[in-house]
Amino acid sequence: MRIRDVVYAVGRSGYVNKDLVAVKQGAKQNGMVYEGKPATPGYRRIVQPGAIISVMLVLENGAVAIGECADVIFSGLAGRDPLFDPAEHLPVLESTVREWLIGRTVDQFRANANELDQMQVNGDRLHTALRYGLTQALLSATALGRNLTIAEVIRDEYDCAIRTEPTDLLASCHRGDTQQLDRMILKRAAILPHASFTTAADLGPGGQVLVDYARTISTRIREIGEADYRPRIHLDVYGTLGDLFGDDVDTLVTFLGRVAEAAQPFEVLIETPVIATSRAAQMDIFTRMRAGLKARDIKVGLIADEWCNTLEDIREFADAHASDFVQIKTPDLGGVNNTIEAVLYCKRHGMGCCLGGTANETDLSARICAQIGLATSPDFMMTKPGLGADEGYMILTNEMLRTIALIESHRA
């Protein structure tokens, strides 16, 4: 099966882009937006609507394979590619990339994806968002051409086993939306609520707001959850513990002990407690924090996100056992072939992993990631797109259930 035509459309993502550097420098918040000028190159405003490019590959038989190019909320931060502006990238899509795609055989995904992911134009690789969406489309095209699900294509080409039950989900909720939290408890989300803390001020004096929030979640789970419901409590703090307490590991570990005590009897996962100035520095402080937590028998799992962006980064963290989990933030890895490789590498090397991503994606990219999760078996996946929780929970759960049912029907 070959690609007959390529069509592009610029659309909307499920969330926004945000200049975290400007936010942390003290930009004044005004509702959803922040006053002042952005500090990171490429941003027109500190908060601006996210944009995507839909890539539609028209196959010889008329079927259309779609992938969507998207970037993360905090683009341009901690080693990431710059903010994704579709207008800047359409010319290369309409020329070099289009020429590469037209007439290409899509019988095999892996070879096509590896080649596209390494493509260079004027000496530079394509933006990670482009590689992300283009390889989604190639993966979908191979599935359509071979009359298989995406999960089955991955199974065949990467020699992995497809799950027979959905992967656990981390439900991403707005911190201030108590009804949203209640709904996720009622739906028995395996992990919740994400609940972003993006500035040190969000934590309150001495971090007391975070401690109280962990206690509130624990209390609410016990109040309205079913008796056998034992979720993990996940809190993404975007480096704010480092902003508040500095890089003194003993102080950080002591504080995490307070959070763990407040969340009892539930296990706590803390994502990005600090953001260092380099990957090496990030790995070093994570390693020392893990050792400190273990020495004091504090049951808190650490999740690496910032400075753990690419497949190479993830391999480095896994080899060093520098974290309990890594978040495989799918748009940051470029081609979804790298996402697949990252999950499988983590599993082979004893590193926990979340097949994550960003609220700034789309329903379609989330559905493709759901099938990647079924085929590769990460420890858990994050709901997306958006921060509505319900919608992402529905999209990922139903895509996994549909795929499992289809695969079972193929065996009948």
Image (cartoon, helix red, strand yellow):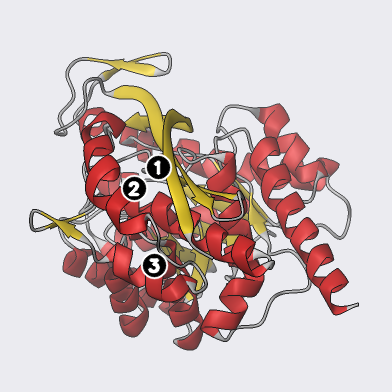
Q: Would residue 86 be visible to someone looking at this image?
A: yes
Q: Mark 1 packing: few (<14 Cα in 10 Å), some, or many (20+)?
A: many
Q: Nearer the viewer, mark 3 or mark 2?
A: 3
Which structural element holds mark 1? Answer: loop
The disc labelled 3 sits on which kind of residue? Ala
Cα–Cα gap, marks 3 and 1: 17 Å
Residue occupying image coordinates x 54% and y 35%: 386
Which structural element holds mark 2? Answer: helix
Cα–Cα gap, marks 3 and 2: 14 Å
Q: Mark 3 packing: few (<14 Cα in 10 Å), some, or many (20+)?
A: many
Q: x, y (%) of residue 338?
A: 39, 68
Residue 356, placed above or below residue 383: below
Cα–Cα gap, marks 2 and 1: 5 Å
Q: x, y (%) of residue 107?
A: 52, 72
Q: Which residue is mark 2?
A: 129
Q: Which residue is mark 3?
A: 113
Q: Nearer the viewer, mark 3 or mark 1?
A: 3
Q: Would residue 189 be visible to someone looking at this image?
A: no
Q: Which residue is mark 1?
A: 70
- Asked if labels 1 and 2 touch by Cβ distance under 8 angstroms, the answer is yes
Which residue is nearer to you in this view: 4 or 270? 4
The N terminus: image quadrant: bottom right
Which structural element holds mark 3? Answer: helix
The disc labelled 1 sits on which kind of residue? Ala
> Could you say which disc has been placed on residue 130 in the image?
none
Q: Earlier in the sequence, mark 3 or mark 2?
A: 3
Residue occupying image coordinates x 88% and y 51%: 226
Q: x, y (%) of residue 366?
A: 57, 49
In the picture provided, is 42 more to the left or to the right than 370?
Answer: left
